[in-house]
Image (tube, rainbow, N blue to C red):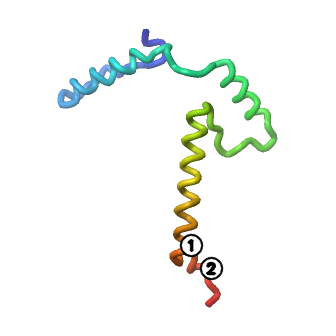
Amino acid sequence: MDASTTWPELSIDAYAERTAATKKVWQSMNGQQAGDPAKLAAALLAVADQKQPPARFVAGADAIDAVAAKGRELIAQAEASRTLGGDLAHDDG
């Protein structure tokens, strides 16, 4: 049941109840993860084989969507900063 996780022996009394609940949830997910480990392995080998691999590799459609959304959010923040005068360091005037 705990094949993919090593649980620590130490515990802090103040957090013991919450830790037990969290551990139970994680244990219930063991072996139920979405995705195809063989596809991930093949993708990682393909990335490792590239002469110039990407700085970051994101696996899984849900993760790719989340990273893309964060990227759009950061671009919007950068553009808003530019509009508000955030590019003053490069101003010639």
* Residue in front for this viewpoint, 83 or 33: 83
Name above or below for residue 75 compared with residue 17: below
- Around disc 2, counting alpha carbons within 10 Å, would you say few (fewer than 14), some (14 to 19), or many (20 or more)? few
**Farthest top residue in view:** 1
SS at circle 1: helix
* Residue in front for this viewpoint, 10 or 70: 70
**Residue 2 locus on image (x, y percent):** 43, 12
Q: Earlier in the sequence, mark 1 or mark 2?
A: 1
Name above or below for residue 91 compared with residue 26: below
Q: CA distance from mark 1 to mark 2?
A: 11 Å
Q: Residue at x 69, y 29 (%)?
A: 44
Q: Is residue 50 left or right of residue 93?
A: right
Q: In the rendered structure, which amino acid carries the disc numbered 1?
A: Arg
In this view, the mark in front (1 or 2): 1
* Residue in front for this viewpoint, 59 or 84: 84
Q: In the rendered structure, which amino acid carries the disc numbered 2?
A: His
**Residue 86 locus on image (x, y percent):** 53, 74
Q: Quadrant of residue 55?
A: top right
Q: Point out the image quarter for the N terminus.
A: top left
Residue behind mark 1: 82
**Farthest left residue in view:** 14
Residue behind mark 2: 90
Q: Quadrant of residue 30?
A: top left
